[in-house]
Every structure is written in C-alpha cells, then in structure tokens.
Image (cartoon, coloured by chain):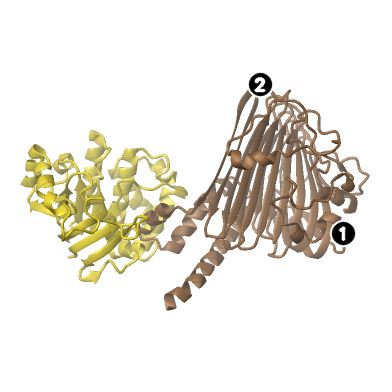
Amino acid sequence: MTTLEIRDLHVSVETDADDGREILRGVDLTVRTGETHAIMGPNGSGKSTLAYSVAGHPKYRVTSGSVTLDGVDVLAMTVDERARAGVFLAMQYPVEVPGVSVSNFLRASATAVRGEAPKLRTWVKEVREAMGGLEMDPAFAERSVNEGFSGGEKKRHEILQMTLLKPKIAILDETDSGLDVDALRIVSAGIEAVRAAGQTGTLLITHYTRILKYVKPDFVHVMAGGRIVDSGGSELAAVLEDGGYDRYVKTSEPAVAPGPVVAAGAGS
Amino acid sequence: MTLAEQPGVTATPADPARTGPALATPVGPAKPARERTGGRLTRLRSTDPEAFAKPQGREEDWRFTPLRRLRGLLDGPPADAKLDVTVSGPAGAAVGAGVTVEQVDGSDPRVGSVLTPADRVSAFTRARADGALVVTVASGVALDEPIVVRIAGEGGTAYHQLVVDIRPFASATVVLDHVGTATVAGNVELRVGDSGSLTFVSLQDWAPDAVHVAAQAVSVGRDARFRSFTVTLGGDLVRLSPTVTYAGPGGEAELYGMFFTDAGQHQEHRLLVEHGERSCRSRVTYKGALHGDGAHSVWIGDVVIGPVAIGTDTYESNRNLLLTDGARADSVPNLEITTGEVAGAGHASATGRFDDEALFYLMARGIPADEARRLVVRGFFAEIVDRINVPDLAERIMVAVDAELDAAEGARVGARSPVASA
C-alpha cells in the first residue's frame, strides 16, 4: 500500500523574469494504491503543471507545499530518483530520442527502476506480451524512441512503459488526447490491465470524459485556477459532461482576480 | 587561396552568414584548375609547395585552423622520425588472396594519379614522403575480410603516402588506423575501378598530443561504389581534406564521418565532392559531439556540380552536438551548381545543445543523468557506427566514445564538486 500525498502545493513556471508565474495555488490531493483519480479541468487550469511538478521537470519551481510518497519527501529527489521510487508520468508529448531503440530504452529503464537487469529470456517474453496486449507490432521495438511515431503510437509506447515498470503511482497526462476510438480502446485496456493488478494508484489527467467510459475513476476532481475546486465520485464526470467547466471557471475567478492574497503574478 | 574563376551559375546555399565569406575573392594569376567542374569552389592544385603561398591565418582555407599548433608543417620540415606502418588482415592475419602490397618510390605512376596536392602541406608531403605504400586489389576479387593499414606514430615529424587501387569489379574494405603520437602529414589516394566497390575507414585514434594533416582523395570509377567512414577521436590538431571525383558516370559515394572533440582539441574536416560526370550520386553525413573548454570542430562541405554533370544527385549534412559551454563547432556547407539538370542537390547543417527534454524523458523513466546522456550521445552516433561493416571496429569506436563520455562525466562531476561542497 502506497500513498502519494500532495499538500498545499504552490508551483511557478520558470520564466526569464525573476519571480516566475504562479500556476498551482495550493493543491491538496491524496492518491493510494488501487485508487483511480481523474483530474479534469479547462485548459490552463494547472493539470499538466501538477503532473510535471510531481515528476520533477526543471521548468517548474515548487514555491511551497509538499509532495510525499509514504511519508518520504518526493520534492527532494532528482527526476530519476522519483521514477525509481515508483512515480511514473505518461507524457502528453513524449520526447524523441534519435538513435536509441525502444528495446534498449525499455531495458535501460526497467533495469534502473527494478534495481537489476531483467533476465534476458523472461524479459523478451514480458516485452512481447506487453506489446501484444497493446496491439503493437514487434518491429516497433527496433525503432528509435518516439521518432516518427504517430500520436497513437506515442501513447501506446507510454502505456507500454507503464505496464513494464509497474509504478506505485502513475500519472497519465492527457493520454487520451489525439487518439481515435480504436486507439483509445486499446490504450484504455492497457491502463485497466495495470490497474487491475492492484499495485498502482492512478492519476488520470484529461479534458474529456470519453476515456472515463473505459477507465472508471473512483474519484473525480475538478481543477480550475490552479486549485482543486470540486471533488466527487464518478457521477461528477457526468455532470461535467453536461455542464462543462463554466461554473468552475466563474467561481474560481475571485482566486485569480488581483487582490492582496494572490497579488504575486496573478492576472499575468 | 588562389582560385580559378570561371563563368557559371553559382547556387549559394542556405546559411548565408557562413557561406558568404566561403567564396573568397580570387587573387593573382590563377593556375589552371580542373576543367571538368571549374567553379569557384575548385581548388588550385600543384605538386610544388611554393605554388601555395604560406598561409597567414586569414585565408579562407586556413582561417579556422590554429596555424601555430601545426608544428611547422606549413614549412615542410624534413622528417625526423619513422611511422610504424603495417598492412594486414583483421587482428594481424595475412591479407587475403588477390591483394598486393608494395612500397614504391615517388616516380611510380600510381603516385599522384588520383591526388594532386591542393594545399601546401599536401605538396610538401609529396616532396618529403619516402615514396608510397601501394595496396592493390586485383580485378574481380571480392574480399570478405578488411585490409588494415595501421599507422603508429612514435613521436617526431613524419610523412606518409598511401595508394589504394581497387581494380575493376573488385570489392574490398580498407581500414586506415592511426594510433600513437607524432606530427604527421599524409596523402591518401584511393582509386575505385569501374564497377568496383570500396569501403574505406579512416580512424584517427591518436594520442592527445598528435598533429595530423592529411589529404584523402578518391576517384570513383564508372558505376563504382565508394563508402567511407572518417572517425576522428584523438589528437591535438587533426585536419583532414577528403575529396571525391568521378572517373565515369554512374558512380556513387557515401561519406560518413564522426568526431568527438574534447577540451582543447581542434578537429577539422574539409570535404569536397566534385561532380564532373553524369548521373553520379553523393551523400555526406558527418556528426560531431563536442565537450569542454576550447573544443573546436570545423566541418566544410563543398559540393561542385560541373556543367556536364547532369543527373547529379547529392546531399550533405553535418550535425553537431554541443555537450558543454566553451565548445565551438563551425559548419560551412557550400553548393555550387553549373548545370541546369540535377536530380537532387541539397544540404543541411545544424548545431545544437544537448536536448534537455530528452534528458528529462529518460530520467523520468528512472535512468540516471549520466547514463541518460550516454544513451543520447551513443544514439546520436549510432546512425554512423551502425553502418560500419567491420564489427570489431564498430565496437572499438563505441568503446572509445564511451571512454570520451566517461571522461566528460568525470569533468562534469569535478566541475560541480566545489559547488556541492560550498
């Protein structure tokens, strides 16, 4: 049983200006093994910032608050240490790494996360099965990481990594974006398979409710203006489906309006 | 530099900031240049060192080279040392059947049959070298194993000349392996006979204090195929000038190169492909990684398509990866077209820093930063190394790249530690 605790997290994005711009303004969230949380919200509400901050992207600066994994300070860890501690981020825009084959990359990351090189024979089988589950051609393993991949291939590749790395906490940043119906079904099945194993807590970041038809969340949170402004069960997704984010954007307005509490960087 | 200027259309390439000055003003009475191409990028050629004015450092051909570190090679000092030159099959085995190895004197007609010196050092090399080593692969012979010419420097100043003659319909792989240390000037002439095939690997695996200046010229016969790998890892100063000419239509040349330039090293590759025949193809792909203060690489990629060379298909590219601050990569592609009908002609040059997003991506999968950097750099060079069809050599090159990266990581950690302890 693992618990990711995010407490009063404030994050600014690094800019050329000295102070930066505050994106997250006090996020509280707890994710436990076996739970699936969906974070929804309009563009610019801070969803991706939350994901990248937990993963440790250097562009984002945590100005206050805490992130812990079973009580251990995640924010003090380097990016690779976080991954080895069990935090996984499926990226919205996976990065191309020319010349590094998928098979080499997967093996290097599995070796790092597991702390030892997987045994070759079982590894080959493991990769083949995981790729089969995501309906990926075996030839895929010989291509360079993300180079020339279609949008759907990139997302499958992310979920393939999640399948093999078996993270304690998986953050999926808009994994559903840019997928057609078939690809969405395949990718969702991959996420479900990891979830069904019961060893992973999942944080699903999305704009749209359609992926929630395949991956049922236990909790749905609405993010607006850098905070979680509403939380509920999966029924909240249905409400959002009908009503959109308008009322949250409106109610969150006082938080982003210029005022003494949020004067720093607000409204920029 | 003295240039023979002839009328013709000059297609100037992209990157105007760099290529502008590359076409220098012609000075003085020009010596006859090669007539087949005859454009502005065509070089003066002569066996007389004094036909080339001694460079002062501002000439187009020499402006990137730190002349003072040439150890006097521009004055053609007499040789005061020998190179240890051996010719063998792989791992010291005998060369295969159909291969002749001779040491000939300078009057042998094969010496100078492909290469007429195009700079002062090359002309001095012709004058000072003790003849030439000639390796011939007989007509129709297809060798499975590479021929390895190993040149080991043992200090001092030395000259060498090598002629490789691939007779028609023969095919071979020749590895020119430079190790040790010396101040070396070399002339390498490669002839690929009609329908022949040559893979040529020139490995500059010098000790850190070597100085190496060499001209490497190939003549590609009718329907012949030439593929080269120029791998420069060591040396204090390395300046190579590979040139390609075609002796008939249908020839194909692929020139791959890679260099790993460390702090203080100067590694310069000056390529010229002269398309003077119809329907020939050329591809130039060079990749460099630079690390540390004062690391300096220079890549000049000149392609000339002459008036008769219709149906030419050419593309050249140079990519450089700057791993740290303080390193400098100069990259100058030049393309000169004097015919109206080319099948394809283009070039690309890009120099960039290490991709931090790629680093983040790999680290977000648990891979430590040093290993992630290694993966990226290995991946960067894989495009070149994976094509080298001599497995032992490809392995050795990757091991050397790893060693360079280890040294680079060591320097990185060393540079950081005062900060960490502060």
Name of the residue lying farthest toward the right: B107
* Residue at the spot 41% in from the left edge and 52% down from the top edge: B358
Relative placement, left or right, of A110 versus B141 is left
User: B72 and A77: which one is in front?
Assistant: B72
Tag 2, which secondary structure?
loop
Residue B359 x, y percent position in the rendering:
41, 56
Q: Colour of chain A?
A: yellow
Q: Which chain is brown?
A: B
Whole-angstrom CA distance, mark 1 to mark 2, is 46 Å
Quadrant holding the C terminus of chain B: bottom left
Q: What is the chain letter for disc 2?
A: B
Give me the residue at 71% from left, 55% from top.
B238
Q: Between residues B144 and B46, which one lies in front from this camera angle?
A: B46
Q: Dot 1 corresponds to which residue?
A: B77
Give the residue number, with chain letter if any, for mark 2: B340
Residue type, label 1: Pro
Check the image and name the residue furthest to the bottom.
B421
